[in-house]
Image (cartoon, rainbow, N blue to C red):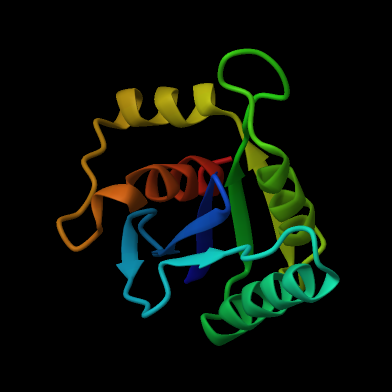
Amino acid sequence: MATVCGVELKGHEAIFTIVEKREDDSFLVKATDTKKIALKDSDSREGVKDFKEQVNAFFANNNVETVCIKKRGKKGEFAGGADTFKMEAMIQDSDAKDVKLVSPQAVSSYQKKNNIVAPGELNKYQHNSYLTALAGADK
C-alpha cells in the first residue's frame, strides 16, 4: 500500500490527511492524532526549525511516501500568504520521498469525475487535504 499525505496550507497552519492506496486503487483514510501543524513564529529561526522538525516527525511516524500539497495562487484575490509559502518550501525540503504540487483545478476536476464524498471520520477542515491526497495519488 502506498501512503499519501494531502496538505492544505491555510494561514499559519498545514492541514494533513493521510490515505493509503490499496491494490484495487481504492483509498483508506489513516487515523492520526495530528491533523494540523502550526508555524507559530515565522519570523524566528526557532519557530521555522520547530515547524520543519514537527513535519518531518509526522511524515516519519506515519510512513508517508508521497506528499501532495494543494497549490495556492501567487497573486490576485486567492493569493496565499507569506507564511503559506514558507511552509510549502519547508515541506518540499522535508524528508518525504516525493512531494508534488497539485492545482486546485486538478483537485476539483478529480472530485467531480469520481463523485468523491469525504469520509465521516474526517473533520470538515480536512476535506480539501483529503481531496488533494486523492488527486495527487492519481497522478
Left-right relation of 57 to 121: right
Q: Residue furthest top?
A: 76
Query: Where is residue 117 drawn, in percent x and y?
Result: 21, 41
Left or right? Give the position of 45 relative to 61.
Answer: right
Q: What residue do we see at 82% from left, 62% from top?
A: 93
Relative to 58, 22 lies left or right:
left
Along the line of sight, the residue nearer the viewer: 118 or 138: 118
Left or right of residue 94: residue 80: left
Count of numbered circles on the image: 0
Residue 29 in the image: state x and y as whole percent. 32, 65
Figure check: 36 above or below 8: below
| Residue located at (76% from left, 51% from top) | 86
Q: Say which of 32 and 49 sits in front.
A: 49
Q: Which quarter of the figure has residue 41?
A: bottom right
Residue visible at 41% across and 67% down?
35
Whether residue 6 is situated above or below residue 132 in the rendered picture: below
Q: In the figure, 51 relative to 127: above or below?
A: below
Q: Quadrant of the C terminus?
A: top right
Q: Is residue 47 above or below residue 4?
A: below
**x and y percentages locating residue 104 in the rendered image:** 52, 27
Residue at point 59% right, 50% down? 68
x and y, in percent, of residue 124 in the image: 25, 49
